[in-house]
Amino acid sequence: MEQLVTAREEREQVIVEASNEISSEKKKARELQRKLDDANKKVTKLTADNAGLREAVDAKDALVGELRASEAAARDELAGAAARLESAQKQAGSLKYEVRMLQKELEVRAQEREYDLKAADAARRQQAEHLDRIARLEAECQRLRAMVRKRLPGPAAIAKMRDEVDQQQPQQTLTPRASPRRPRPATPSSPRSVASSPFTPRTPSPRRSVSSEADGYAFKLRAMEDENRALKQALAKRESELQIVQMKYADEACRFTAAQRQLKNLTEENRQLSDANCQSESWASALISELEQFRSGPECPTAEASVKDWAAQEEELLTAILNLQTLHFLQNSDIQAAADKLAECQETITILNKQLQALTTPATYKPQSLASILAEGSADANGSKSPTTSKQVQFKEEHDAFSAVPKMSSEQEQNATTENKDSIQIVVHPVFGEPRQEGVSADPGKKKKRSSSLLGRIMFRKKVEGSS
């Protein structure tokens, strides 16, 4: 009986232990099931987060590709701007060279003006000397007329005077150009000397020769006065044209300095643009490295913070690129404005060059000295009494040629003024004329070589007056 009781107790104990183990196993199974459900929920949540992160990474990759394309376009535009800036600098160098050439041309003009003034002074002195000679000749003629009126010669004296005139005529025909002034006959200065030599002062031929010589000198004096008047007018025109050119040159120098200042500002902006481009490249490289780290690294709780930092850096990069594009647009507009101003300066300097070339005196102009005029007049005094000299004939021909030239119409003048006012972006390389020789003599008797005609200078003056 005891064995049965002990066996029953053992069985009951085994059953209790088995039931306890079964209950504990059930509890463990429920806990494992709950943990499995939690793990499944976490897995679904993490898969959803992973899908969202993958979509964000794909979007960022596309954005990085667009940023790279925009960066390449910005680099191309920057290279074009650098090329335009280099061409603008070359144009500025050519403008500087042209300005130097204009300065040299103005110096040559100033020297020519000094030589012209010296020649005009010499002509004035010669004119004063000739006026004194003419006054002395007129006084001598009046004295001779008075002496002839006082005492008339007799028949024997007239015959003797005829013989003397017949003897003097072959000598005058042999040496007609010995001197522009004939030797004055020895006339007595008192009635006693007249009585001692009665036949010398009463000859009619010397009176006629002296009167004809006085008329020739008066005619030469009038021609010389006309020539001096024409020279004064030409000198006044040249001075006014030179003042106009100097004022235009000063305006162009101011514009050129402004263009240089603007080019300096453009170079500084270009430097800032290159710095901003380097900074954007560094930001893009840092962004790419962070993306590669994000792709290669394991998933961690700090991924969201890194994504936020990356988004902030991306926004900064976008703002920097926008600023870069706006700065590049402003630089392009500034370069275009500078190029327009440089083109305008080049066009005005070209116009000034043409005006300076037009201001040069004609090559056919040959000033004639007073000595040569007097020599020619004394040579032709016996044979011709023409009212014009070679200088007057030349001046008349030039005047007729100028009057024969048709005037510009109002439409052409309006087009010329609009072309002078408007600025066209054309690179013009003017051709400067050959520089003149500096060693020009101040003697008016020497001939000067000129490069343009009087007609061209008069037409240029008309054009300047119409444009102003």
Image (cartoon, rainbow, N blue to C red):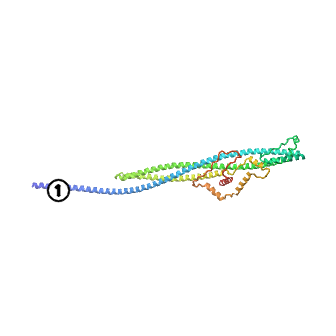
Q: Read off the residue under disc 1.
A: 15
Residue at 40% x, 55% y is 61
Image coords of residue 53 (percent x, y): 37, 56
Vertical comparison of 110 with 45: above or below: above
Residue 434 visible (yes or no): yes
Pick the residue in front: 87 or 3: 87
Residue at 72% x, 44% y is 122
Residue type at mark 1 is Ile
Number of residues whose C-alpha sits closer than 10 Å to that of mark 1, classed few (under 14), some (14–19) or many (20 or more): few
Residue 154 visible (yes or no): no
Left or right: where does residue 439 sit relative to residue 188?
A: left
Left or right: where does residue 414 sit relative to residue 309?
A: right
Image coords of residue 271 (percent x, y): 49, 48
Vertical comparison of 182 with 459: above or below: above
Left or right: where does residue 239 sit relative to residue 287?
A: right
User: Extreme right residue here?
Assistant: 155
Image coords of residue 369 (percent x, y): 73, 47
Pick the residue in front: 5 or 392: 392
Viewport quadrant of the N terminus:
bottom left
User: Extreme left residue here?
Assistant: 1
Image coords of residue 447 (percent x, y): 69, 48
